Image: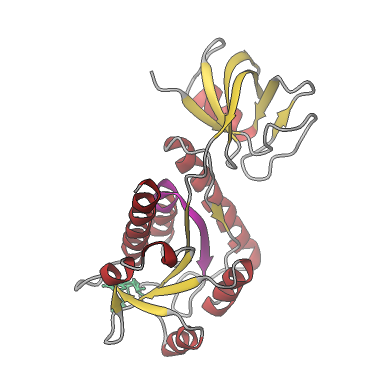
Amino acid sequence: MTIHEFFFPAGFGSVGAREAKNGGDCRLSPGESYLVLSGDEHRHLAFAKRLRVGQQVRITDGAGSWAICSIEKISSDSSFLKIKETGSAERELVPVTIILSVIKKERMEWAVQKLSELGISRIRPVMAARSVVRGSRERLNRQQARYQKIAVEAMKQSRGSWLTVIEPVATSVQEAVHAEKDINGGKKVLVPEKGAESLSLFNLLSAGHSLYPVTVVVGPEGGFTSEEITFFQDEGAEFVDLGPRILRAETAAVVSASALALLWHGLSTA
Ligand code: SAH
């Protein structure tokens, strides 16, 4: 029987009530042997999955801690779980950030789901010059929250213990690349782009370990503008060719991420 997974973002380490950052309102009860799920996670357990008292569930905090719990009580707004066993999982995320130009809603959400399943560490959405979707800061923040929720669902579905982080939606590729470089200065930046000076992704992969950590910047349906290309050149980014066919933006993102994830997992088990 498969055990259902739920998200409790506060971690299992300390005592007291805590506010959840990403997944709704979850609390760790004093004494540490109980968890209380409310908000989305409670609704998911009680109404979507229709789990019952006595059943076991797996809880993860998205940062490597997990707990096996039994359901003690379900009320209208909370699920009370008794912790049976706890542990920590090795980081299964791949040291890859995808900076993804904002594209149509459904395609963007599909990409976020697939990139999260693959265990990409970070996704940074960006309004590229030719992104067709525009919005106020408030709308962009709502999008970020929505993508983070999709990433949580994907982690649970994939039995992950580490959560793909969705960064705030950047308003230009310059802002996105600089924000990423601030996190890890020496990071390599790859830009999938067809062109004479592009290297094939296949050849790039022969660099092995030294490729990571790596950031990949994927353009919108209309591609990057010449100003954006010049910016990437000035930043010392490398252009990569993903093959003879022009892929949709979300496909280009998932193809790049899968190749980098497969290589990473291959290198770590070799
Ligand atoms: N309108 C553009 C295609 C944009 S596709 C054109 O006609 O050329 C959206 C994004 O996917 C691109 O900006 C690029 O980052 C990526 N992409 C798609 N196919 C690719 C390929 N074969 N090689 C490299 N990058 C690709």
**Residue 263, picture quadrant:** bottom left
Q: Does the magenta stretch include residue 231?
A: no
Q: As displayed, is residue 227 above or below residue 258?
A: below
x 41%, y 89%: residue? 226
Q: Residue 88's x, y, as percent?
A: 57, 34
Q: Residue 46's x, y, as percent?
A: 55, 22
Task: Confirm whether residue 110 shows in the render.
Answer: yes
Q: Nearer the viewer, residue 97 or 7?
A: 97
**Residue 25, picture quadrant:** top right
Q: In this view, does 220 lie to the left or right of 42?
A: left
Q: Give the range drawn in magenta.
A: 114-126
Q: Residue 13's x, y, as percent?
A: 72, 33
For ligand 1, the image quadrant comes to: bottom left
- Quadrant placement of the N terminus: top left
**Residue 63, picture quadrant:** top right
x 45%, y 80%: residue? 237
Q: How many marks?
A: 0
Q: As displayed, is residue 164 above or below residue 102?
A: above
